[in-house]
Amino acid sequence: MKSLSLFALGLFTLGAHAASAVDSEQLRSEAASLIPPFQQQLLGTMKQAMSDGGPAQAVEACQALAPSIAEQHSQAPWKVGRTALKLRNPDNAPDAWERSVLEQFAQRAAAGEPIQEISHAEVVDGQYRYMQAIGTAEACLGCHGEKIKPELLSLLDQRYPQDQARGFREGDLRGAFTLSRPLAP
Ligand code: HEC
């Protein structure tokens, strides 16, 4: 009798694990699939402004449009955004959970894990939360690198008086995409 109930318990536990694994796998791939179109629109907007009017216009386009692009890609129930430890726009500041994940990402990157493979998912206070690391590409250096042109620097100083998002090198961890949605009841 005793062994039978343990057997039943074992089966139940196995079943519950399998079910939650399927759900979180689905949420994770849903979250991951929202990132490429968001990223492409940010890059496309930036490149267009760059070719229309150079880097100063591109900074203005980022400032004016990045928040609404994030909103546009936040399709209910998902909320989509970007965050970082070294920030340009203070509105992108991480909350406590995001900060600790960004710190983990920095350690994982320092330990040699490829940035494009770094992500983390967790259920926090009834929300499914997902973060995916963003690396620094060559195309980012003009505005986030070590040698930003003086005229661009003064524009950045003016628009973002607390800017810390500079001094990056190609391949550095720049920040992360951050997504969340309430779990279904
Ligand atoms: C033309 C200048 C410019 C270029 C090039 C650029 N950025 Fe930015 N970046 C900005 C500005 C301006 C902001 C602030 C936008 C906002 O208000 O959300 C920003 C914000 C960010 C943020 C949000 C976190 C924060 O610090 O506010 C991330 C992440 C980011 N950039 C990553 C990148 C990456 C990765 C690249 C290269 C693929 C890149 N940027 C290229 C100007 C630029």
Image (cartoon, grey):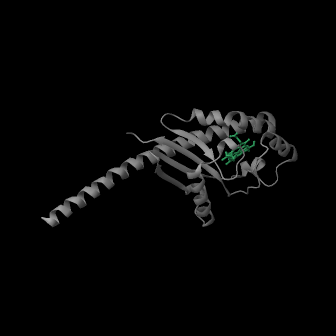
**Front-most of 113 and 86?**
86
What is the total number of numbered labels drawn onto the structure image?
0
Q: Position of residue 24 (x, y in %)?
A: 41, 49
Please give the name of the residue rendered at 63% of the width and 37% of the height, measured from the top-left corner: 41
Please give the name of the residue rendered at 61% of the width and 50% of the height, measured from the top-left corner: 176
**Front-most of 149 and 79?**
79
**Front-most of 93 and 155?**
93
Q: Position of residue 71 (x, y in %)?
A: 59, 34
**Front-most of 122 and 135?**
122
Above or below 54: residue 162:
below
Please give the name of the residue rendered at 55% of the width and 50% of the height, measured from the top-left corner: 131
Q: Quadrant of the C terminus?
A: top left
Position of residue 155 in the picture relative to residue 99 (left or right): right
Please give the name of the residue rendered at 23% of the width and 59% of the height, measured from the top-left corner: 9
Position of residue 66 in the picture relative to residue 143 (left or right): left
Q: Farthest residue in the left direction?
A: 1
Q: Quadrant of the N terminus?
A: bottom left
* Quarter of image, ligand 1: top right
Q: Position of residue 27 (x, y in %)?
A: 44, 45
